[in-house]
Amino acid sequence: MKNEEIKTLLSKMTLEEKIGQLTQIRTSYYYNSNTSATGTISKLKFTKEQKWMIGTVLGKLDAKMMFEIQKEYLDNNRLGIPLLFMHDIIHGFKTIFPIPLALSCSWDEELIEKTARVAAREGSSSGYQATFSPMVDIVRDPRWGRVIESFGEDTLLNSIFGVAMVRGYQNGDLKDPDTLISCVKHFAAYGAAEGGRDYNTVDISECRLRNEYFPPYYEAIKAGAKSIMSSFNVLNGIPATANTWLLRKILREEWGYEGVVISDWGAVKELIPHGTAENSIDAAKLSLKAGIDIEMATTAYFEALPELCKDKSMEKLLDDAVERILLLKNECGLFEDPYRGISYEKEKQTLLCSDFRKVAREAASKSAVLLKNSDVLPLERSKNVILIGPYASNSSILGPWSLDGDLNDVITIEQGLINKNIRLEGVETTCFNEISKEKSEEIIEKAKRADVIVLALGEEEEKSGEAGCVSNITLPEAQIKLLRCMKKLNKPLIVLLINGRPLDLTNVIEEADAVLECWFPGTEGGNAIADILYGDYNPSGKLTMSFPRGVGQIPVYYNNLATGRPKELLKNEKRYKSQYLDVPNEPLFPFGYGLGYSKFKYDNLNISKKELSKKERISCSINVTNIGKYTGIETVQLYMRDKVADISRPVKQLIKYKQIIINPNETKTVEFTIDEKDLRYWNGENQYKSDEGLFEFTLGKDSSEGISFEVRLIS
Ligand code: BGC
């Protein structure tokens, strides 16, 4: 359909049909008689007739169901406007990749794009047209369970990886039936919930929003994401769902966004408990005015808009929203082919095919972060191993938001070792929170016979993800006890961690000889972990979120603002400086940190010029030499500090990075160019600008160390 014809279609629609387009309900209302018009649907306050006017649905589907639902729907929809099927395809559909936080530790933009491409091919083959992904909320509080879904604490990485996912899903042409519409979320700053408690208040200055939290959303929509989801939280006093400044002024006026805005689940009616709406009528009015096009999972629009739209200005808002939704349906070709080429055969060939499994294995290998290694890894194949712990042979390693992943398809850690023909002395699966005395004794006896002890520890899946917030981020006591018991046996002791958030690992690090953070690694997790343990993959992951020394340090992140009393500068001052008296300021493991089996030496820094004028660019380079025995990937990071600015600026800010593969004894020169645009920020007076004067740059392997140099920006 030509876009101009959408207006004609709109002119034929009744008020009720228009409101239907703005309403999203669960797919199950169309296939499950328990949730049909006579069941749960009645709670939602819409009629049986209105069911055939609904614009979009979310939830479980496969190709056959999609075909049947769409067909029945079109038989009943007066104007033949197809339904749009949306779903949470977050880190893979059937082939599950590591959780997004893990993927970000690969620092591999192409890989991340590839995972989204696979997810789009799989999801679309089962009948979906849209996914609620990527989530690009900056996260600095590991108590918040949804950190699993973010790309970490850094603005640049969230921007780059968010854009990569948009590209992977949409692939530049939504008419192609192998693609999915990307929905960026959660606008805005959902990840800054106070106390790390889900759905909680967010209060952040406009400076912070614009310099740190907004850029990833902005970049994702500039990359073409056709929809965006508002967040649950209050932002600076006003819930995002009713926040006109956010959704109209920033998003539409400033950023020129023309796509669809969808509320989060039930968030329109949640304006009532938020205390900003008295009833559904208020809630609908505030949301439509603020710019919510699609109301997810509740029906305030159905209840209130017939009356509210007697006001012409409200009717105009309704028409604009409907037009955007129809344009979206047109964009992905639904008017030409409401089934978008699905077939049972295509679905069968696509889901979990061997090529996709290979991507999952690569992704899981590249996402793991080696936190400690006292020369015990990689392991020798001849040594016999005992594998112990709650994740030893547990297939629940897909992680939260893997709604369509099947545990039967998972390669467990045990299976990964078996696939490599490792001599297993024993495999002991324990509970997460309790290990009986008898079980402990049994394990000790068996462990005595092994050459190497591998402990597969971690957090249960329910401990993270949405509403998976905790106040204690250590491993359960029973697992620490097990670790201490094993330590007494004086054998190489390797800890594998399966979890969804940065943990307080102070106890673990002291006891273990090697610690590999595997996160929730997805379908191919066991194979990838075995690849790393035996040196078939040289670990290259680098943290994208700092690991605190304890909850008391939270929030701890690398790019904090400067204080007037920095600890580093006041070495002779004992007390009156910005510090904790009981722990260091620095996290246990900083942003950007990660070990491998090789070592890389940085030297020979070169800078083309020490002065940068606004019209030119300068280059800096450094030599990186692999002084170890294994070929490896190194991620060279370039940080910047604006030494004198209009507002306080971060003590460090990642502005560029490059990944290189280096063979043993090989030296590679890594070069970066810097221009004035790299130095800009929002200055509190509605200007994006740079400051003339001194800038400090640091080139290094993580955010805590490196080789620094200064450059002066001149006019
Ligand atoms: C989550 C969203 C998700 C939506 C639909 C909400 O609870 O916050 O991220 O896309 O549910 O499942």
Image (cartoon, rainbow, N blue to C red):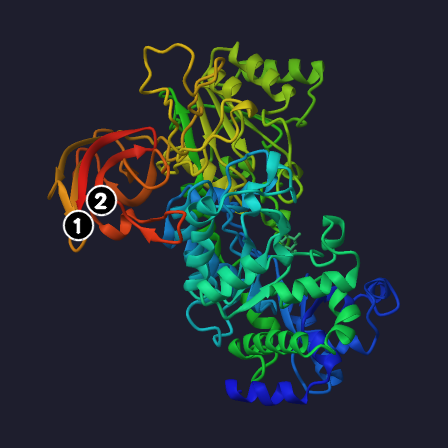
- Left/right placement of residue 710 relative to residue 429 reads left
Q: Position of residue 387 (x, y in %)?
A: 55, 26
Q: Residues within 10 Å of mark 2 (few under 14, many from 20)?
A: some
Amino acid type, callout 1: Ser
Q: CA distance from mark 2 to mark 1?
A: 7 Å
- Left/right placement of residue 691 relative to residue 471 reads left
Which residue occupies the foreground of this view, 83 or 270? 270
Amino acid type, callout 2: Glu
Which residue occupies the foreground of this view, 319 or 152? 319
- The residue under label 1 is 715
- Left/right placement of residue 243 relative to residue 670 reads right
Which residue occupies the foreground of this view, 396 or 47? 47
The correct choice, above or below, for 483 with respect to 34 in the image is above
**Which residue sits at x=58%, y=72%?**
345
| Figure quadrant, ligand 1 | bottom right
The correct choice, above or below, for 294 with respect to 208 in the image is below
Circle count? 2
**Which residue sits at x=58%, y=60%?**
244
Q: Position of residue 361 (x, y in %)?
A: 45, 47
Under tag 1, what secondary structure? loop
CB within 8 Å, label 2 to label 1: yes
The extreme right residue here reads 38
Q: Which mark is residue 454?
A: none
Which residue occupies the foreground of this view, 78 or 655? 655
The correct choice, above or below, for 284 with respect to 646 in the image is below
Q: Is residue 448 visible?
A: yes
Q: Position of residue 190 (x, y in %)?
A: 57, 47
**Which residue sits at x=51%, y=48%?**
137
The extreme front residue here reads 685
- The residue under label 2 is 692
Mark sitting earlier along the chain (2/1)? 2
Q: Residues within 10 Å of mark 1 (few under 14, many from 20)?
A: few
